Amino acid sequence: MRRGGAGSRVLGSGSALPRRIVTNDELAARIDTSDEWIVERTGIRQRYIAGEGETTASLATDAARAALADAGIEASEIDLIVLATATPDNTFPATATKVQHALGCHGGIAFDVAAVCSGFLYALTVADAMLGAGQGTRALVIGAETFSRILDWEDRTTCVLFGDGAGAIVLGAGEADTPAREGRPGLLASRLHADGSCHDLLYVDGGPSTTQTVGHLRMKGPEVFRHAVVNLSSVLGEVLEDAGVSVEAIDWVVPHQANKRILDATARKLGIPPEKVIVTVDEHANTSAASVPLAFDTARRDGRIGTGDLVMFEAMGGGFTWGAALVRM
Ligand code: UT7
């Protein structure tokens, strides 16, 4: 999709993290790694890991409540919940329906989107299109994960990279006859892509229809890294062109937080100054579908992202899937 449906607007955001922080040194005490290696190769210093009673649905519900409070909207006003996750509470029903019930919303639409680390971009684009098509006026778009539960904790090449968390935004339908152009707030453009031939570079080695197990995450990191920089730079260029906006006009880039070196290399390739890039990978590690909305909420709450700002979201993950979206706040 090249343009936002009718330019739905961000009305609020929220996020949630598990109680427990796990530092690099704590991991180094258990497996053959070091704080020095992890920081130098990834920028990660710590991650949050879900404990007893904390699940994808519980984190998503907390993030959604915070987003509703920020938007000043009651749960009963939500018509649509689109939740991006690769670590649902159950194989079915959709985790979005659990969140819907926990929030006390009734009768609207609720479903999950599976696009792994690009899940939030997919969910945002789908929700915007549905609001634009008249399927409601208020949506919750959530990215929530408990990746700690699909990690192989003996595999140092993957287990140090990920964390758990959730982020959410409330979207309000735009006016169909006044698209979000010329300084008006709203989703200006979004682009999504997928290339299923890259399945084996980043996947989970289990599932209900294959092994009847949940499985563990497997990744060929350096190959994913190379694809990430190329794909992200290219999709950012496409979105800027669709929106008719120059790269200099972007106020903030909110990237998927996989690796500080990917963030730096992508920004360098496009000529985006590092001070415009929101970085939370040091604190949260890679939280997959949660990472973009978590970083976005962090930067809104600390006052960096404000009204009128032009914000670029981008992400790439398993599949491969990747995408970007440009939003005026
Ligand atoms: O969210 C979806 C998208 N995911 C990503 O974007 C991840 C993309 N990939 C990456 O971020 C990086 O490729 C990694 C962080 C996964 C790996 O960094 P790298 O610089 O590409 O390292 P490497 O895999 O080439 O490994 C270099 C060395 C190897 O040792 P040898 O063969 O040179 O002796 C690894 O065995 O580092 C070793 N190594 C580690 N050493 C200490 C790998 N993991 C660790 C570790 N601690 N945790």
Image (tube, rainbow, N blue to C red):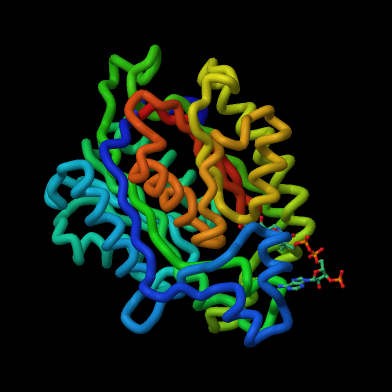
Determine the quadrant in which ligand 1 lies. bottom right
User: Percent from the top left, x then y, of residue 233?
Assistant: 68, 35
Q: Which is nearer the eye, 229 or 96? A: 229
**Which part of the image, by quadrant, shows the C terminus?**
top left
Residue 219 is left or right of residue 103, and the answer is right
**Residue drawn at 67 percent across, 53 percent down:** 196
Task: Decide: is 245 above or below 219.
Answer: above
Q: Which is nearer the eye, 244 or 159? A: 159
State the image quarter where residue 259 is shown: bottom right
Q: Would residue 171 be seen by someone viewing this image from the given angle?
A: yes
Most extreme residue toward the top is 182
Task: Decide: is 205 above or below 193.
Answer: below
User: Percent from the top left, x then y, of residue 19?
Assistant: 36, 73
**Residue drawn at 38 percent across, 70 percent down:** 18
Q: Would residue 6 be seen by someone viewing this image from the given angle?
A: no
State the image quarter where residue 26 is shown: bottom right
Residue 15 is left or right of residue 30, and the answer is left
Residue 263 is left or right of residue 13, and the answer is right
User: Percent from the top left, x then y, of residue 61?
Assistant: 27, 62
Task: Decide: is 139 above or below 183.
Answer: below
Q: How many marks?
A: 0
**Residue drawn at 63 percent across, 30 percent down:** 272
**Residue drawn at 34 percent across, 55 percent down:** 15
Q: Which is nearer the eye, 119 or 130? A: 119
Residue 151 is left or right of residue 325, and the answer is right
User: Percent from the top left, x then y, of residue 256?
Assistant: 55, 49
